[in-house]
Amino acid sequence: MSTYRGHMGHGHGHTHALPASQRGLRALWVSFAVLAVTAAAQAVLVGVTGSVALLGDTLHNVADALTAVPLGVAFLLGRRAASRRFTYGFGRAEDLAGLLILAVIAASAVFAGWQAVARLMAPRPVTGVLWLALAGVVGFVGNECVARYRIRVGREIGSAALVADGLHARTDGFTSLAVVAAAGGAALGWSWVDPLVGLGIAAAIGWVLVSASREVLGRLLDAVDPALVDRAEQALRSTPGVIGSGSLRMRWVGHRLTAEAEVEVAGDLSLVAAHTIAHEAEHALGHALPELTHATIHAHPPG
């Protein structure tokens, strides 16, 4: 009967002044700088202490910092206008960057585990225990600050890849605390504690890989939070003039949420009246879902 396509604008509903992609880029580069400084400080202390646990933690921090590069490129690509070939735009580049982040997490887990096993087979004393403990504390503080920042911004702009990167940083923070445990073992003369902690770090990295994979792979399969669907359906049904709702589909394209919905209206309405109701339904969706940037509403008579 009538179809309305609404473009609500990037970041509709947010009170933040910066567009979502620009906020994501800022979060990436600020956190990159923090992690780069943290990793550099730890790298110096790896040479002083000879700790394989600290080596694994440092490598993980380096990998976490470097994931900002492909994700930053993806955010820049996502700002390009849609073309006749890429009619949905380039937001999916962000999801591809998420896959690369998963690969980096997996590689760092394998390498950290390999180094720990090698040290178990060929033990070596750890020196500079106090420096080792300090490196662990520095790593925890730096990573936790980055994790909080990335996860908060990622959830606000709807970026699964940025949230995954934040979870990666949070795991780095807890593995840095494990380095403090390695320092305690070294102080007691237990040379086996350091490589054992290294294995624990590798296992922790593997766990965050599983958690991040659910988020990133779910986006690639067009998964959305069921709570968003509930809010959207409620908004459509509460729109004046809508007497029922039909199919509803939503998907993320990068950190942009789009929706397609059907609503039932009275069969004796004019085309203009049905179009107006569809417009109001789109407006209600925009208020219920601040993440929404595009909606297509089709109004039709009952049945």
Image: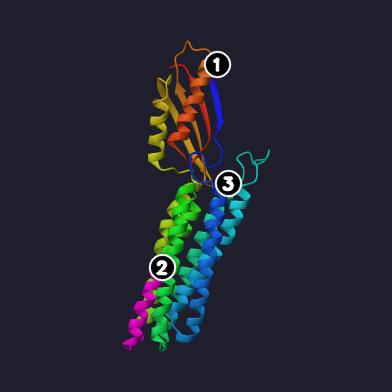
Q: Earlier in the sequence, mark 3 or mark 2?
A: 3
- Residue 230: x %, y % from top left: 38, 35
- Mark 1 or mark 3, which is nearer to you? 1
Q: Amino acid at mark 2?
A: Gly
Element type at mark 3: loop
Give SS at disc 2: helix
Residue 68 left/right relative to 169 = right
- The residue identified by callout 1 is 272
Decide which of 145, 51 is in the foreground and name it: 145
Q: Which residues are magenta?
A: 171-192
User: Between disc 1 and disc 2, whose residue precedes?
Assistant: 2
Q: Amino acid at mark 3?
A: Gly
Instruction: Indicate the position of residue 100 as horizontal and vertical percent values.
Output: 54, 59
Give how far apart the Cα atoms at labels 1 and 3 are. Answer: 33 Å
**x, y percent for residue 157:** 49, 47
Q: Is residue 121 visible?
A: yes
Q: Amino acid at mark 1?
A: Val
Helix, strand or loop at mark 1: helix
**In the picture, residue 226 is in which quadrant?**
top left
Is the stretch drawn in magenta largely helix, strand or loop? helix
Q: Residue at x 54, y 53 (%)?
A: 24
Say which residue label 3 marks: 91
Determine the CA span between mark 3 and mark 2.
Answer: 30 Å
User: To which residue does mark 2 refer?
Assistant: 173
Task: Tell us which disc is closer to us: 3 or 2.
Answer: 2
The quadrant in which the C terminus is found is top left
Point out residue 143 in the picture as x, y percentages from the top left corner.
44, 66
